[in-house]
Amino acid sequence: MNSSSPVIKNFKDWRVRHDPPPDVHIVRFTNRKLNYHSYYAPEGYTPEEILQFPGAKRCLPGTADKVKEWIETNEKKGICDARTRTVWKKKPGSDELFDTGITY
């Protein structure tokens, strides 16, 4: 494939789900074909495209604008884990999470 080839995005390969209790407020994204598992929306997809992933309309805010806002909030504030009462954030340039040391 050369750089001018279009990228094929298969929305059906993605799954959007809530974490089990007590963290049902946390949404995770998975794509087994890409071995992608993250609490952050995958890069390279618009909010409109993300809403086409199976489970997205059930787990995410209803409009593309609200999904965009949700993504920006997670990137800025991190993810709150109810079991450990800690806040996790994504390391810059990767999908790896780190404990911010912030508790609530």
Image (tube, rainbow, N blue to C red):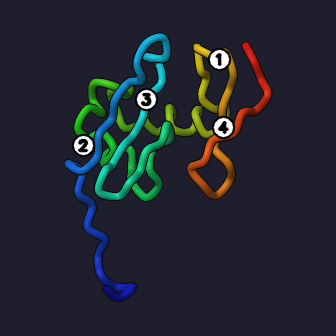
Residue named by callout 2: 52
Secondary structure beneath dot 2 equals: loop
Q: Amino acid at mark 1?
A: Thr
Q: Is residue 92 left or right of residue 66?
A: right
Location of residue 30 with respect to 73 vertically, above or below: below
Q: Residues within 10 Å of mark 4 (few under 14, many from 20)?
A: many
Which comes before the other along the chain, label 1 or label 2?
2
Residue named by callout 3: 27
Q: How far across and down, in percent of the image, does residue 34 sit?
A: 35, 58
Q: Which quadrant, please, contains the N terminus?
A: bottom left
Secondary structure beneath dot 4 equals: strand
Q: Nearer the viewer, residue 20 or 11?
A: 20
Q: Amino acid at mark 4?
A: Lys
From mark 4 to mark 3, how far is it between C-alphas?
Answer: 14 Å
Secondary structure beneath dot 3 equals: strand
Residue 61 numbered mark, or none: none
From mark 4 to mark 1, how far is it between C-alphas?
Answer: 14 Å
User: CB under 8 Å between callouts 2 and 4?
Assistant: no
Q: How far across and down, in percent of the image, does residue 84 sit?
A: 65, 17
Which comes before the other along the chain, label 3 or label 1?
3
Residue 89 numbered mark, or none: 4
Q: Is residue 18 left or right of residue 70?
A: left
Residue 84 numbered mark, or none: 1
Of the two numbered discs 1 and 2 in the rendering, the one whose residue sits closer to the viewer: 1
From mark 2 to mark 4, how far is it between C-alphas?
Answer: 25 Å
Q: Amino acid at mark 2?
A: Gln
